[in-house]
Amino acid sequence: MDFHFANLPDDFTHLLKVNMQSSGKHFSDLQSYIVERKGLYLLFRQIFKDIDNSGNVEKVLKSAGWHGIRDRLCCLYIENLINGEYPSSVQTGNCYGILGFEDILKPYSIGGYSRAFLLGFYLKMSSIEQNLLGKSTGAINFNIHEVVEILSISSARTVKIDLLVILIKHLIDFFGKDQLKEHIGQGLKYKDLYERLNLEQKSLMVNNFLSYGSSINEKEIFIMEHIG
Protein backbone atom coordinates (compact mmCIF):
# COMPACT_ATOMS: atom_id res chain seq x y z
CA MET A 1 0.00 0.00 0.00
CA ASP A 2 1.71 3.15 -1.24
CA PHE A 3 0.36 6.66 -0.84
CA HIS A 4 1.51 8.97 -3.62
CA PHE A 5 1.93 12.72 -3.62
CA ALA A 6 -1.17 14.34 -5.14
CA ASN A 7 -1.09 17.89 -6.45
CA LEU A 8 -4.02 19.31 -4.47
CA PRO A 9 -5.07 22.99 -4.45
CA ASP A 10 -3.65 24.48 -1.25
CA ASP A 11 -6.21 27.28 -0.96
CA PHE A 12 -8.99 24.70 -0.98
CA THR A 13 -7.41 22.07 1.26
CA HIS A 14 -6.74 24.76 3.88
CA LEU A 15 -10.49 25.29 4.21
CA LEU A 16 -11.01 21.55 4.70
CA LYS A 17 -8.59 21.53 7.64
CA VAL A 18 -10.10 24.35 9.70
CA ASN A 19 -13.27 24.68 11.75
CA MET A 20 -16.00 26.03 9.47
CA GLN A 21 -18.86 26.11 11.98
CA SER A 22 -21.05 29.15 11.36
CA SER A 23 -20.11 30.68 14.71
CA GLY A 24 -16.38 30.43 14.04
CA LYS A 25 -13.78 32.85 12.71
CA HIS A 26 -12.99 30.94 9.52
CA PHE A 27 -16.66 30.89 8.49
CA SER A 28 -17.10 34.62 9.05
CA ASP A 29 -13.85 35.36 7.20
CA LEU A 30 -14.68 33.17 4.20
CA GLN A 31 -15.56 36.09 1.92
CA SER A 32 -12.25 37.87 2.48
CA TYR A 33 -10.35 34.57 2.22
CA ILE A 34 -11.81 33.80 -1.21
CA VAL A 35 -11.71 37.34 -2.60
CA GLU A 36 -8.07 37.84 -1.61
CA ARG A 37 -7.05 34.76 -3.64
CA LYS A 38 -7.63 35.87 -7.21
CA GLY A 39 -7.43 32.44 -8.81
CA LEU A 40 -9.84 30.92 -6.31
CA TYR A 41 -12.19 33.89 -6.59
CA LEU A 42 -12.26 33.65 -10.39
CA LEU A 43 -13.26 29.99 -10.17
CA PHE A 44 -15.80 30.79 -7.46
CA ARG A 45 -17.50 33.42 -9.60
CA GLN A 46 -17.62 31.07 -12.56
CA ILE A 47 -19.30 28.13 -10.83
CA PHE A 48 -21.68 30.13 -8.64
CA LYS A 49 -22.96 32.58 -11.24
CA ASP A 50 -26.29 30.73 -11.16
CA ILE A 51 -26.73 31.97 -7.58
CA ASP A 52 -25.12 35.40 -7.89
CA ASN A 53 -23.36 36.69 -10.99
CA SER A 54 -21.70 39.56 -9.12
CA GLY A 55 -19.43 37.26 -7.11
CA ASN A 56 -20.91 38.10 -3.73
CA VAL A 57 -19.51 35.35 -1.49
CA GLU A 58 -21.83 36.17 1.41
CA LYS A 59 -24.90 35.81 -0.78
CA VAL A 60 -23.71 32.46 -2.13
CA LEU A 61 -22.84 31.31 1.38
CA LYS A 62 -26.33 32.13 2.63
CA SER A 63 -27.89 30.29 -0.30
CA ALA A 64 -25.65 27.23 -0.67
CA GLY A 65 -24.07 26.99 2.77
CA TRP A 66 -20.46 26.10 3.41
CA HIS A 67 -20.95 22.49 2.30
CA GLY A 68 -22.54 23.64 -0.94
CA ILE A 69 -19.51 25.80 -1.70
CA ARG A 70 -17.10 23.07 -0.62
CA ASP A 71 -18.74 20.36 -2.71
CA ARG A 72 -18.89 22.41 -5.92
CA LEU A 73 -15.25 23.45 -5.61
CA CYS A 74 -14.27 19.84 -5.01
CA CYS A 75 -16.09 18.68 -8.14
CA LEU A 76 -14.52 21.53 -10.09
CA TYR A 77 -10.99 20.42 -9.22
CA ILE A 78 -11.80 16.80 -10.02
CA GLU A 79 -13.21 17.71 -13.44
CA ASN A 80 -10.20 19.89 -14.18
CA LEU A 81 -7.86 17.00 -13.41
CA ILE A 82 -9.85 14.57 -15.56
CA ASN A 83 -10.42 16.86 -18.56
CA GLY A 84 -7.45 19.21 -18.36
CA GLU A 85 -9.57 22.35 -18.10
CA TYR A 86 -12.00 24.01 -15.74
CA PRO A 87 -15.66 23.58 -16.75
CA SER A 88 -18.09 26.50 -16.81
CA SER A 89 -20.40 24.48 -14.55
CA VAL A 90 -19.78 21.41 -12.45
CA GLN A 91 -21.23 17.91 -12.30
CA THR A 92 -21.76 17.20 -8.62
CA GLY A 93 -21.83 13.46 -9.23
CA ASN A 94 -18.04 13.40 -8.97
CA CYS A 95 -18.40 14.14 -5.26
CA TYR A 96 -20.90 11.45 -4.30
CA GLY A 97 -18.25 8.91 -3.34
CA ILE A 98 -16.42 11.48 -1.23
CA LEU A 99 -19.62 12.53 0.52
CA GLY A 100 -20.42 8.90 1.26
CA PHE A 101 -16.92 8.41 2.63
CA GLU A 102 -17.40 11.44 4.89
CA ASP A 103 -20.80 10.23 6.10
CA ILE A 104 -19.34 6.88 7.16
CA LEU A 105 -16.73 8.64 9.30
CA LYS A 106 -19.04 11.31 10.71
CA PRO A 107 -19.69 9.48 14.03
CA TYR A 108 -15.96 9.58 14.76
CA SER A 109 -15.26 13.15 13.62
CA ILE A 110 -15.58 16.55 15.31
CA GLY A 111 -18.30 18.70 13.75
CA GLY A 112 -17.25 21.72 11.71
CA TYR A 113 -14.14 20.12 10.25
CA SER A 114 -13.95 18.47 6.82
CA ARG A 115 -10.95 16.24 7.41
CA ALA A 116 -12.79 13.05 6.45
CA PHE A 117 -13.87 14.83 3.26
CA LEU A 118 -10.25 15.92 2.78
CA LEU A 119 -9.01 12.32 2.93
CA GLY A 120 -11.69 11.25 0.46
CA PHE A 121 -10.70 14.12 -1.84
CA TYR A 122 -7.05 13.10 -1.62
CA LEU A 123 -7.83 9.45 -2.40
CA LYS A 124 -9.96 10.46 -5.40
CA MET A 125 -7.42 12.91 -6.83
CA SER A 126 -4.49 10.58 -6.19
CA SER A 127 -6.29 7.71 -7.89
CA ILE A 128 -7.07 9.86 -10.95
CA GLU A 129 -3.49 11.12 -11.15
CA GLN A 130 -2.09 7.60 -10.98
CA ASN A 131 -4.56 6.36 -13.60
CA LEU A 132 -3.54 9.20 -15.91
CA LEU A 133 0.03 7.97 -15.49
CA GLY A 134 -1.09 4.48 -16.48
CA LYS A 135 -1.00 3.07 -12.97
CA SER A 136 -4.08 1.46 -11.44
CA THR A 137 -4.38 2.12 -7.70
CA GLY A 138 -7.91 1.04 -6.82
CA ALA A 139 -8.05 4.13 -4.58
CA ILE A 140 -5.19 2.50 -2.64
CA ASN A 141 -7.52 -0.48 -2.03
CA PHE A 142 -9.11 1.51 0.78
CA ASN A 143 -11.68 -0.62 2.61
CA ILE A 144 -13.17 1.99 4.92
CA HIS A 145 -15.62 -0.48 6.46
CA GLU A 146 -12.78 -2.48 8.02
CA VAL A 147 -11.39 0.73 9.47
CA VAL A 148 -14.80 1.62 10.89
CA GLU A 149 -14.94 -1.74 12.68
CA ILE A 150 -11.82 -0.67 14.57
CA LEU A 151 -13.03 2.90 15.13
CA SER A 152 -16.31 1.62 16.56
CA ILE A 153 -14.48 -0.07 19.44
CA SER A 154 -14.22 3.39 20.99
CA SER A 155 -16.81 6.17 21.19
CA ALA A 156 -14.13 8.86 20.96
CA ARG A 157 -14.19 11.57 18.29
CA THR A 158 -11.17 13.34 16.86
CA VAL A 159 -10.48 16.41 14.73
CA LYS A 160 -7.81 14.72 12.62
CA ILE A 161 -9.90 11.70 11.71
CA ASP A 162 -8.00 11.45 8.42
CA LEU A 163 -4.72 10.70 10.17
CA LEU A 164 -6.33 8.18 12.50
CA VAL A 165 -7.97 6.40 9.57
CA ILE A 166 -4.66 6.17 7.72
CA LEU A 167 -2.98 4.81 10.84
CA ILE A 168 -5.65 2.15 11.40
CA LYS A 169 -5.57 1.19 7.72
CA HIS A 170 -1.86 0.45 8.03
CA LEU A 171 -2.30 -1.54 11.23
CA ILE A 172 -5.02 -3.65 9.61
CA ASP A 173 -2.70 -4.40 6.71
CA PHE A 174 0.15 -5.29 9.07
CA PHE A 175 -1.69 -7.30 11.74
CA GLY A 176 -4.95 -8.28 10.07
CA LYS A 177 -8.32 -6.93 11.19
CA ASP A 178 -9.16 -9.70 13.66
CA GLN A 179 -5.72 -9.69 15.26
CA LEU A 180 -5.82 -5.90 15.57
CA LYS A 181 -9.23 -6.05 17.26
CA GLU A 182 -7.87 -8.63 19.65
CA HIS A 183 -4.84 -6.48 20.49
CA ILE A 184 -7.04 -3.46 21.17
CA GLY A 185 -9.40 -5.60 23.23
CA GLN A 186 -6.42 -6.59 25.36
CA GLY A 187 -5.82 -2.92 26.11
CA LEU A 188 -2.89 -2.29 23.79
CA LYS A 189 -2.56 1.31 22.63
CA TYR A 190 -1.71 2.36 19.09
CA LYS A 191 1.74 3.33 20.34
CA ASP A 192 2.27 -0.21 21.65
CA LEU A 193 1.24 -1.65 18.29
CA TYR A 194 3.56 0.71 16.45
CA GLU A 195 6.47 -0.56 18.52
CA ARG A 196 5.70 -4.11 17.36
CA LEU A 197 6.18 -3.21 13.71
CA ASN A 198 9.39 -4.09 11.93
CA LEU A 199 11.58 -1.41 10.36
CA GLU A 200 10.15 -1.97 6.88
CA GLN A 201 6.59 -1.53 8.14
CA LYS A 202 7.48 1.59 10.12
CA SER A 203 9.24 3.06 7.10
CA LEU A 204 6.26 2.38 4.83
CA MET A 205 3.85 3.97 7.29
CA VAL A 206 5.97 7.06 7.84
CA ASN A 207 6.57 7.55 4.11
CA ASN A 208 2.85 7.27 3.42
CA PHE A 209 2.07 9.82 6.11
CA LEU A 210 4.65 12.15 4.60
CA SER A 211 3.15 11.72 1.11
CA TYR A 212 -0.29 12.55 2.46
CA GLY A 213 1.00 15.44 4.54
CA SER A 214 2.80 17.03 1.61
CA SER A 215 -0.30 16.57 -0.57
CA ILE A 216 -2.55 18.46 1.85
CA ASN A 217 0.21 20.96 2.73
CA GLU A 218 0.32 19.97 6.37
CA LYS A 219 3.89 20.33 7.49
CA GLU A 220 3.44 19.13 11.05
CA ILE A 221 2.40 15.52 10.66
CA PHE A 222 4.09 13.63 13.46
CA ILE A 223 2.82 10.10 13.59
CA MET A 224 3.60 9.64 17.28
CA GLU A 225 1.03 12.31 18.16
CA HIS A 226 -1.72 10.10 16.79
CA ILE A 227 -0.82 6.67 18.11
CA GLY A 228 -0.94 7.22 21.85
Image (tube, rainbow, N blue to C red):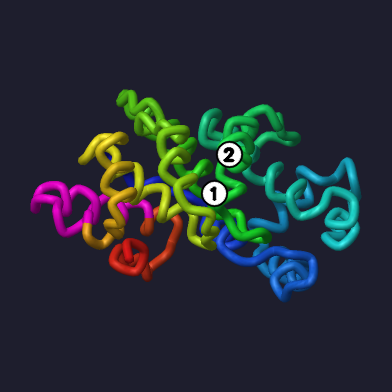
Instruction: Kindly indicate the quadrant of the structure image that contains residue 149.
Output: top left
Label 1 sits on what residue type?
A: Ala
Magenta: main secondary structure equals helix
Closer to us: 69 or 188: 188
Residue 107: % across, % down: 60, 48
Residue 48 numbered tag: none
Instruction: Kindly indicate the quadrant of the structure image that contains residue 157.
Output: bottom right
Residue 189: % across, % down: 30, 59
Instruction: Give the CA distance from mark 1 to mark 2.
Output: 9 Å
Residue at which label 2 appears? 104
Q: Which residues are magenta?
A: 193-212
Determine whether 20 is above or below 89 in the image. below
Left or right of 93 on screen, residue 77: left
Marks 1,2: beta carbons within 8 A? yes
Q: Residue at x 37, y 70 (%)?
A: 220
Label 2 sits on what residue type?
A: Ile
Q: Residue at x 45, y 47 (%)?
A: 153
Residue 14: % across, % down: 56, 62
Closer to us: 142 or 3: 142
Between circles 1 and 2, the one closer to the viewer is 2
Packing grade of label 1 (10 A; few <14, some 14-19, many >=20) is many
Which quadrant of the figure contains the N terminus? top left
Disc 1 on helix, strand or loop? helix
Residue 47: % across, % down: 76, 43
Determine whether 20 is above or below 177 in the image. below
Residue at which label 1 appears? 116
Q: Outermost residue toward the bottom?
A: 25
Marked residue nearer the N-terminal end (1 or 2):
2
Which quadrant of the figure contains the C terminus? bottom left
Q: Outermost residue toward the front?
A: 186
Closer to us: 38 or 56: 56
